[in-house]
Image: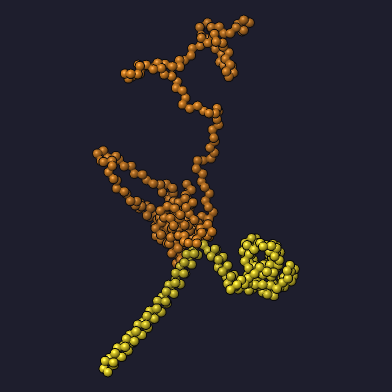
Amino acid sequence: MGFRKFVQIGRVTYLNSGRFKGKLATIVDIIDMNRALIDGPCTGVPRQEYKFSNMYLTKYLLKIERGQRRRRLRLAWASSKVSEKFEKSNWRKNIQKRETRAQMTDFDRYKLGRAKQSRSKIIRTVYHRLHKNMLKAKDKRLKLRATKKKAKKEAKAKM
Amino acid sequence: MEESKTKPKAPAEDGKLKIKLPLRGGIVCFGRGKKKFMKRAPEFITKPIGGEKNGGTRTVRVKKLPAYYAPEHNRRKRKISGPKTRQRKLRSSLTPGTVCITLGGLHKGKRVVFLKRLDQGLCLVTGPYKINKCPLRRINQIYLIATATKLDISGIDIPKHIDDRYFRRTKKKVPRSKDGDIFLKKKKERYTPSEQRKKDQLHVDKQIIAAIRKRPDKKYMFGYIGTNWALRSNMYPHLMKF
């Protein structure tokens, strides 16, 4: 599979570094190999140049012109519901997860560890039960096969 | 009269010379001729010495030459301001009841409860002993990581006699045995806490455990304090919150 996200006019980006870290903005113009003009009218990012190395490309694309004015840009952003879509995405969930993990205190980490322990204990018991049942069933099957074979042999011998 | 003024001092009637002391540094108001009246203390004396091949006598300086010549005259002494040991500021995160992680000493890695600061500046902590076997101990704050978890021990009673003196090591004076072998290996004495310490430990532990019991998450709290802290992979203590 080839590339699916390109640096192009209207590409929504996630700013992962710099002053507006953690916000979404869209590419309005491409300045050179390293920078783009971005704007995020609905996310509080003013129009500015931003390095490509400081942003991630998202899968969202707005239908806008090159150097689109703010009013149209806002309309395009709102109609495509980029913010809402991003809010629901797994990407956002992962970011939140990372944030909550970073906020955890030592005691929280301990409690998390205990919760994980009890979770894996539940999983383990269920797994072992199923495994045991499976083995039992297998055993039964084998026994049945053995008896059948035996019966066949006996029948052959009689003949 | 005039003559007597201009003339340098003649020997006085009692035969002793009246000598003016040096006027300024290096300038002496009497000439070479007058010097003979001054009696200088001898610099050297001859002393009889023992030993066969030592010549019998030796000239020795009356006053020993100084062993040290200052490279600089009138050198100022450095002022030592303030008391010798300055008490460092206690970290603001360390308040009575804070659960801390110990990073040094015998009990390193344990989670302990900070009780108070002693006069010398060391921190008084306890396990409690019943939970994680860390007794009442002194520890420097640099070996403590304060966590955000705090126990409410506001009404706790820590016996007043628990101070720096209480924790001081007692040296036993061992009398030298007269006929015993000095190279004989001594039996290593194991430390055993005194009755007083045991009593104090119980007293403090009881109150702290009661404070833990009051918490809604007491079940976790007991386990938390009871387990050791350790770093695992992908754990960067400078980026972590405690």
In the rendered image, residue A21, in percent from the top left (x then y), is placed at 63, 63
Residue A118 picture quarter? bottom left
Q: Is residue B231 above or below residue B65?
A: below
In the rendered image, residue B37, in percent from the top left (x then y), is placed at 51, 9
**Of A87 and B120, the residue lying toward us:** A87
Say which colour chain A has.
Answer: yellow
- Relative to A117, is B185 on the left or the right? left
- Residue at position x 39%, y 60% in the image: B130
Residue B209 visible in the snapshot: no
**Of B30 and B201, the residue lying toward us:** B30
Count of marks overlaid on the render:
0
- Residue at position x 53%, y 65% in the image: A101
Residue A143 picture quarter? bottom left
Q: Residue furthest left?
A: B179
Say which colour chain B has.
Answer: orange
In the rendered image, residue B4, in percent from the top left (x then y), is placed at 60, 6
- Identify the image quadrant of the N terminus of chain B: top right
Q: Is residue B61 above or below residue A48?
A: above
- Relative to B109, is B56 on the left or the right? left
**Of A74 and B120, the residue lying toward us:** A74
Q: Is residue B143 above or below residue A124?
A: above
- Residue at position x 58%, y 13% in the image: B29
- Relative to A70, is A83 on the left or the right? left
- Residue at position x 44%, y 47% in the image: B164
In the rendered image, residue A51, in percent from the top left (x then y), is placed at 65, 62
